Amino acid sequence: MTLTRRRLLQVTSAAVGTATLSIPASTAHAVTEAASAKATFRRNAWSRMRGMTAPSSLTEADIAAFAATGGNLLRVGFSNRPLMRKEEPFDLDPGAFEQLDRILDSCERHGVRVVIDPHTFPGLRDDYTTFPDDEFWKDLRYHELAMRLWDAVASRYHDRGEVLAGYDLLNEPAVPDIHAEEGPASWNALVLDLVATIRAHDPDRPILVASAISPRRDSPLWYTRFESVNALPPPPDPNIVITPHMYAPHAFTHQGVSYPEGVAYPGEVPGEAWEGLPASVYWDSETIRRYLAPALEYQQTYQVPIFVGEFSAPRWIGDSGNRYLRDTIDWFERFGWSWAYHAWREWHGWDAELSNTDKDDLTRYPTTPRLELLKGYFRRNRRRPR
């Protein structure tokens, strides 16, 4: 670790605050107003975008249909076909890269930009997220493999032009100790290594850095992804974008997925320690604002763009789910944040083209209340000329 990196990590490692939902409403409001007033980012090549996440199985027809909604960004994830195989000898997958080539070509034809999201790496046991006890956080060999993958990606795509919006380093890091300064458990150290790897090929394109969740040293409540932005180092170059995900509260956003159904919004929702929430919290638009407040403070301090790379709610819970999404997006809009709804033509539970009330109805409809909600915001996009 260089002295510069060590100093960056020491400056920020103690900066993570207390539980978000304990922020006084007046304080959260002041942060909101200040950050909203400064949502213009000089020097940064990132532009305002509204779109969706999508799987690597996208076809030309899928991309054309997405473009017709007015969305201008797809965050394309490679969970089902990793760009680097997760078993020895950890080869790059030529077929996955060829599919990414096709997606970029198609998106360019349809005026849609792309964030490259490898989504999973060797050393991660799950293809969709990470856990603090993954081997990835125990052995630096896996960090070296991540660097090798990003070296391959950046060297292949550095000259793709405007269609490539940015590189998303790692999906949903969950680390054993957010304060770790070095070694395999340090997300901050890995961030700087990955940024340097990409910059060797692509000096200016935006790099997306996710905030991590982590157990606290002094509380059973974990850090949330919005609190933990304050543990990230100050952005090491002007084209860094911070990308938290918003699935709070999980008992609402994942009901019928991995939690019991019947949870209403607005309303009292059970919380869990691992997501940084007390046993029960009343959730409404004001609660969402207070939950997001730490990222606004980081935005204000470092003048760095925020891109909420995923957020959603089960599509079959009707008006309750759509109201949650509307309240959440309204705050993103007020703060000047870019965002990607999860997901376009991936798992049916998030699919805005399917029924908003019937879990078992897998018909793809030309319009649904959720799809119209999203299209209403997409109309604010500036489309690239084809």
Image (cartoon, rainbow, N blue to C red):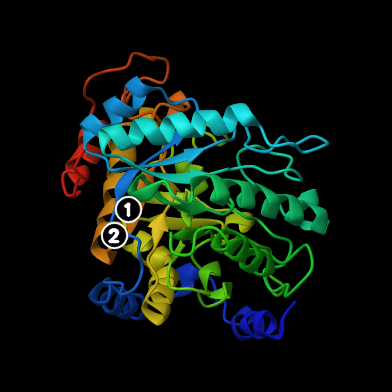
Tell me the quarter of the image containing the N terminus: bottom right
| Quadrant of the rendered image containing residue 330 | bottom left
Marks 1 and 2, how far apart in space?
Answer: 5 Å
Residue drawn at (17%, 41%), measured in percent from left and top? 376
Q: Which residue is mark 1?
A: 328
Q: Judging from the image, what secondary structure is the residue with disc 1 in?
A: helix
Residue 124 appears in the rendering: yes
Q: Is residue 193 above or below residue 27?
A: above
Q: Is residue 3 above or below residue 378?
A: below
| Quadrant of the rendered image containing residue 123 | top right
Query: Whole-percent x and y of residue 132?
Result: 73, 55
Left or right side of 309 for 141: right
Q: Is residue 215 above or below residue 352?
A: below
Residue drawn at (44%, 29%), measured in percent from left and top? 102
Q: Are marks 1 and 2 in contact (CB under 8 Å)?
A: yes
Query: Whole-percent x and y of residue 319?
Result: 27, 36
Q: Residues within 10 Å of mark 2 (few under 14, many from 20)?
A: some
Residue drawn at (28%, 26%), measured in percent from left and top? 64
Frontmost residue, 170 versus 36: 170
Left or right side of 45 for 273: right
Q: Amino acid at mark 2?
A: Trp
Q: Residues within 10 Å of mark 1 (few under 14, many from 20)?
A: many
Q: Amino acid at mark 1?
A: Thr
The number of callouts visible is 2
| Quadrant of the rendered image containing residue 356 | top left
Residue drawn at (78%, 62%), measured in percent from left and top? 184
Q: Is residue 244 above or below residue 134?
A: below
Q: Which residue is mark 2?
A: 331
Q: Judging from the image, what secondary structure is the residue with disc 2 in?
A: helix
Left or right side of 99 for 129: right
Frontmost residue, 291 versus 173: 173
